[in-house]
Amino acid sequence: MIENTPPLLPGENGKDAASHDHSPSDRVVVNEVPIAGIGETIDAILREPGRVHAQIGQAGGLRLLCSLVMLIALGLAAYGFVVGTFTGGIQLWAAPLKIGGGMLISGLICLPSLYIFTCLAGGRASFRQVLGLVAGLIAIMTLLLIGFAPVAWVFSQSTESVATMGVLHLLFWGVAMVFAVRFFRSGFGSVVAAKETGLLRLWLTVFVVVVLQMSTALRPIIGQSETLLPGEKKFFAEHWLDSLQISQQGNRFDRSRGD
Amino acid sequence: METVREHWEGIRILLRGDHVRIAEWCGHFETSRFVAWSLVAMIGSGLFGAAMGWWRAPEQAVYTGLKFPLVILLTMLGNGLLNGMLAPLLGVNIGFRQSFLAVMMSFTIAATILGALSPLLACLIWNTPPLEQGDQSRSSHAVILLALVTFVAFAGVVANVRLLLLLRFLSGSEQAARRVLFAWLGGNLLLGSQISWILRPFIGSPGLPVQFLRDEAMKGSFYEAVFHSVRTLLTE
C-alpha cells in the first residue's frame, strides 16, 4: 500500500497546472500558514504560488517581501559569481554586483508603471502587493537561474567563446522568464483582482526590454573590458549584433575532430 | 547475501515499471537502495562503455568504462537542482529528493539495459575488423555504429517510458508528466552533450592516440563544434 497519494498540483486542486485560469471568481483555497524564512519561501514559490500571492498583502507580508528580496540578492549574487568564472579576475565580484543590481534596478524602474497599469485595469491592490508581485517575478527567475548555474559553470570552464556564453545565458534567462511570467500572470488575477488586459502584456514587454537593456548598460558582464562600465551607449540589439560579429571575426576555433 | 537479493529484486521492479512501488521508494530515501541503484547504474554503464572503447584498444576500454558512468553521474548531479525546480513549476508537485530519485531511477534502468547488452556489443566488436582498418571494412564499422545507436536509443526509450509512467502517477496528469519529462530531457541533453564533449574520446579515432581525455578537452563546446560543422557543410 502506497503511503503517498498523488499530490495535488500547485494551487490547482488537482487541475492541470498549465490551464491557469485565475479570474477573481475562480480562486482556490490556499494554505494560510505564514511563510517564514528563505527556505520556506523557495518552497512556496515553487509549489504554492497562490500562497505567496495571498500572503503578500496580509499582516506578515512585509516579512515575506524581505525574504523574497533576500532570496533575489543572494541568488543572483551566486549566479553572477558563476557567470564571472568565465572571465575570472575582477568579474568574480563585478558580475554578481551587476546582475543582482541590474535586476533589482529593473524591477524598481518598472514598478511605478505596473502600479498605475493595475489601477487602470480596475485593480485594487496596494502598492505593497504590486511590489510583492514584481519581487515574486524576479525571485522565480532567480531560482531557475540558480538551477541553471551548474550547467553554466560547465560551459564557462570549457569554452572561450563570449558569443556562446552570451547565447547560453540568454537562453537560461529566457526560460526563467517564461516561468516567471506564468507566476506573475496567475498573481495578477488573484492579488490585483483585475482582469488581464493589454496593459499587463505591455508592462511585461517593457520589463523584458528594460532587463535586456540593463545587461547592455552594465556591460561587460561576460568577457573583459578596460573599464568597469561602458563609455559608449548602445541599444541591446545593436550591442549583441556587434558582439556576434566581433566573435566571428576573431574566431580561432580549433576544429579538432570530435570523437 | 539476502540484502543483495533484495536489492536485485528492487532492480527487477524498476525494470517491470511497477510505478506504485517506485513512487513509494522515491518518496522515502533509503541509503542502501540509493547505493544499490548507484552501483547498478555505474556497473551497467561502465560495462557498456568498456565494450564501446574496446573497439579502439583495450586501454580505451578501461578509459571509456570509467568515463561513460561519469557522464551519467555528472549530468544527474548537475541538473538535480534544476529538475527539482522544474517539476513543481510544470505541474508535478514533487520535492527535490523525489525528482532526483526519479531521474536516478530512469538512469538506473537505462544502465541496467546497457549493461545487459554489453556482452552483445563486445561480441559484435570481437567479430569485427579492428578500427585501424577502417577503410577496408567500412560496412562492419557502420554495423557497429548502428548497433551502438540502437542499444542506447532502446535503453533510453525504455527508461523514459518508465519515468513518464512514474511522473503520470505522481501528478495524476498526463500533460503535466509529459511537460516535466521533456523539460528534464532538454536539460539533460544540454548538459550531457557538453559533459560528453569534455570527456571525449569514447570510441576513439584511429588517427589519434588513445587518451583518457584529449589535450584540448576543456576547449570549445559541443554546440560550437556542431555549429562549425554545419557552417562548413553549407559553405564548402
Image (cartoon, rainbow, N blue to C red):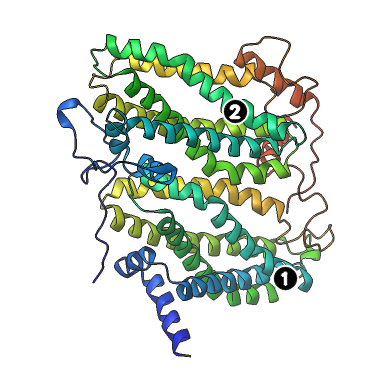
Q: Nearer the viewer, residue B154 or A123?
A: A123
- Mark 1 residue element: helix
Tag 1: amino acid: Ala
**Residues at discs 1 and 2 in contact (Cβ within 8 Å):** no
Q: Give the residue at x 51% y 59%.
A: B153
| Left or right side of A40 for A123 | left
| Residue B4 located left or right of residue A186 | right
User: In the rendered image, which quarter is residue A125 located in?
Assistant: top left
**Residue situated in front as seen by the camera: B176 or B155:** B176
Above or below: residue A185 compared with residue B33: above
Q: Is residue A156 above or below residue B157?
A: above
Q: Name the residue under label 2.
A: A99
Q: What element carries label 2?
A: helix
- State which chain disc 1 sits on: B
Q: Where is residue A214 in the image (x, y as percent from the top left)?
A: 58, 18
Q: Can you see residue B231?
A: no
Q: Report the residue at 54% width, 65% height from top.
A: B151
Q: Do labels 1 and 2 share a chain?
A: no
Position in image of residue B109 (x %, y %): 47, 67
Are there few (<14), some (14-19), or many (20+) residues within 10 Å of tag 2? many
From the top left corner, tell me how far across and down residue A145 is, in percent. 53, 38
Q: Which of A123 and A41 is in front in this view?
A: A41
Residue under numbered circle 1 = B61
Determine the CA span between mark 1 and mark 2. 45 Å
**Residue at 67% across, 43% down:** A155
Position of B171 relative to A145 (above/below): below
Amino acid at pointer 2: Ile
Instruction: Please determine whether, in this image, residue B226 is positioned above or below residue B16.
Output: above
Image point (57%, 16%), residue name: A213
At which x and y percent is residue B10?
A: 40, 76
Q: Left of A221 or right of it: where is A195?
A: left
The part of the image, by quadrant, that contains residue B72 is: bottom right
